[in-house]
C-alpha cells in the first residue's frame, strides 16, 4: 500500500513550488502542459486528492476554516457551530464542517482531510473516544502545520488555544441556590456520565455535597434514556426514603426527563421539588412548565473560538490562550411565567462572586 502524500511532498519530489503544484492540479494556463502532466501523474500514483475548494493561488490563503463536531444532535454543539459560521463569515471566512459521531477514526480522517491544504485552521470539539483511548497524537501532528482551537472538551494533552464553559461554577451556583431555599436532599441526574463533561459535573456536585453538611445528595447516571426515566420516577416516588426536594440535571436529556417525571407524578414545582438543569432554550420557551436552566452561552463559545483562531492566523500567535465563558443560572418563577430572576456567575479577581437570589 502506497504512503499517502501531501501537496508539499509532491512539490518537493518535483522540485517545484507548492503554488505550481496547486495551479497544475487546477489546470491553470500559467503552467506548461509538461509540468501539469508530471504533477498529475505523480498525484495519481500516490492517490493524492487535490483540494478544489477555493484556494487563493496568489497568497496561498483559502479563507476556509475547518470545524469538527462530535455530535450534531447535541443542541449546544449545534448552536456553537451556527455561531462559528456567523462569525467566520463576518471575518471573510467560510467553514467546512465534519461530524465524527464521537468516533476517533472519523476524527483522525477529518483532521487529515482538512489539513491537506483545504483550510487555514481548525476548530474542533474532540470526540469522546479520543479521551477514552487517550489518543492525542493526531492533534499534535496536525497542529505542527495547521492552527487548532479546541472547545468544550479539554485535556492537558491538548495544549492549544481553547474555549470552554465554566461547568464547575454552574454546578456550584445551582447547588448554592438549592441550599439557600432549604433543600435537604438533592438528586443529580445525568445521561452523559461517560462523557468528560459529565464526569466534571458529577465530580463538582459530589464535592459540594461532601463539603456541606446541611444537605445530602444522590446520583443517578444512565445512558439509556428510558432506564433513566424509570430510575428517576422510582426514586422521587419512593416513600421509604427521604424525599428528594431538588433535582439537578447534568444535560438536556436528563433535565427534560426529570421535568416530565415531576409533572407525570403530579409533584408541585418549587413547593415540593425544585429543578435546575441544562436545556435547549428554544424548546424550553415552548414547553410547560419551563425549567430553570444553566445558560452556557453557546453563541459566545462560537464567537470566541473564531476570534482565537483568526488571531492566531493573523499574528502567528504563539501564546496559548484558554478562554473560559462565564455562565448564568436563569431562574423561572413558576407563579409568574414571564418573571425571571437571574443568578449571575460573576468573577472578581477569581475568588469573588456575586449571586442574587429570590
Image (cartoon, rainbow, N blue to C red):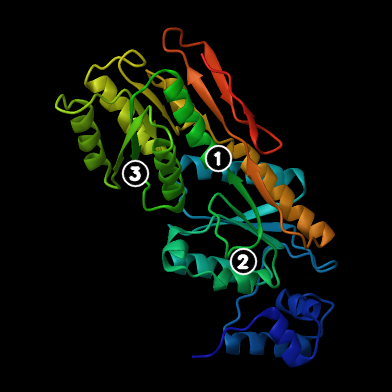
In percent of width and height, residue 314 lies at 82, 57
In percent of width and height, residue 275 lies at 38, 25
In percent of the image, x 34 and y 16: which residue is there? 269
The answer to which quarter of the image holds residue 112 is bottom right
Q: Is residue 203 above or below residue 48?
A: above
> Mark 2: which secondary structure?
helix
Looking at this rendering, what residue extends furthest in the front direction?
Answer: 213
CB-based contact (under 8 Å), mark 3 and mark 2: no
Pick the residue in front: 33 or 97. 97
Whole-angstrom CA distance, mark 3 to mark 1, is 20 Å
Q: Pick whichever of labels 3 and 2 is earlier in the sequence.
A: 2
Q: Residues within 10 Å of mark 1 (few under 14, many from 20)?
A: some
Q: Pick whichever of labels 3 and 1 is earlier in the sequence.
A: 1
Q: Residues within 10 Å of mark 3 (few under 14, many from 20)?
A: many
Looking at this rendering, what residue extends furthest in the left direction?
Answer: 240
Q: Which mark is residue 191?
A: 3
In percent of the image, x 77 and y 88: which residue is there? 35
Whole-angstrom CA distance, mark 2 to mark 1, is 22 Å
The residue wearing badge 1 is 79
Whole-angstrom CA distance, mark 3 to mark 2, is 32 Å
Q: Nearer the viewer, mark 3 or mark 1?
A: 3
The answer to which quarter of the image holds residue 79 is top right
Q: Which mark is residue 114?
A: 2
Q: Is residue 106 above or below residue 307?
A: below
Q: Relative to 349, is 201 on the left or the right? A: left
In percent of width and height, residue 251 lies at 41, 39
In percent of the image, x 62 and y 37: which residue is there? 299
Amino acid at each position: 500500500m502506497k504512503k499517502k502524500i501531501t501537496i508539499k511532498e509532491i512539490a518537493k519530489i518535483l522540485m517545484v513550488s507548492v503554488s505550481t503544484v496547486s495551479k497544475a492540479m487546477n489546470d491553470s494556463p500559467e503552467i506548461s502542459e509538461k509540468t501539469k502532466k508530471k504533477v498529475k501523474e505523480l498525484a495519481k500514483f500516490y492517490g493524492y486528492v487535490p483540494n478544489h475548494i477555493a484556494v487563493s493561488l496568489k497568497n496561498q490563503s483559502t479563507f476556509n476554516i475547518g470545524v469538527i463536531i462530535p455530535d450534531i444532535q447535541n443542541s449546544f454543539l449545534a448552536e456553537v457551530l451556527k455561531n462559528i459560521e456567523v462569525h467566520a463569515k463576518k471575518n471573510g471566512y467560510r467553514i467546512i464542517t465534519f461530524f465524527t459521531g464521537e468516533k476517533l477514526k472519523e476524527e483522525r480522517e477529518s483532521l487529515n482531510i482538512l489539513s491537506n491544504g483545504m483550510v487555514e485552521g481548525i476548530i474542533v470539539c474532540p470526540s469522546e473516544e479520543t479521551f477514552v483511548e487517550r489518543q492525542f497524537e493526531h492533534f499534535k501532528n496536525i497542529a505542527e502545520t495547521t492552527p487548532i482551537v479546541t472547545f468544550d472538551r479539554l485535556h492537558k494533552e491538548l495544549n492549544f488555544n481553547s474555549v470552554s464553559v465554566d461547568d464547575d461554577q454552574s454546578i456550584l451556583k445551582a447547588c448554592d441556590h438549592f441550599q439557600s431555599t432549604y433543600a435537604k436532599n438533592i438528586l443529580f441526574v445525568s445521561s452523559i456520565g461517560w462523557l468528560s463533561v459529565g464526569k466534571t459535573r458529577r465530580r463538582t456536585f459530589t464535592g459540594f455535597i461532601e463539603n456541606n453538611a446541611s444537605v445530602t445528595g444522590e446520583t443517578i447516571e444512565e445512558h439509556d434514556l428510558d432506564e433513566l426515566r424509570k430510575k428517576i420516577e422510582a426514586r422521587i416516588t419512593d416513600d421509604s426514603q427521604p424525599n428528594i426536594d431538588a433535582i439537578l440535571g447534568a444535560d438536556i436529556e436528563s433535565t427534560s426527563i426529570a421535568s416530565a417525571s415531576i409533572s407525570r407524578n403530579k409533584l408541585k414545582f418549587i413547593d415540593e421539588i425544585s429543578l435546575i438543569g441544562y436545556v435547549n432554550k428554544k424548546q424550553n420557551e415552548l414547553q410547560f412548565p419551563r425549567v430553570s436552566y444553566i445558560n452556557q452561552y453557546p453563541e459566545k463559545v462560537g464567537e470566541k473560538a473564531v476570534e482565537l483562531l483568526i488571531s492566531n492566523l493573523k499574528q502567528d500567535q504563539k501564546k496559548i490562550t484558554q478562554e473560559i465563558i462565564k455562565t448564568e443560572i436563569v431562574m423561572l418563577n413558576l407563579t409568574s411565567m414571564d418573571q425571571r430572576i437571574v443568578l449571575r456567575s460573576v468573577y472578581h479577581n477569581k475568588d469573588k462572586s456575586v449571586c442574587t437570589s429570590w
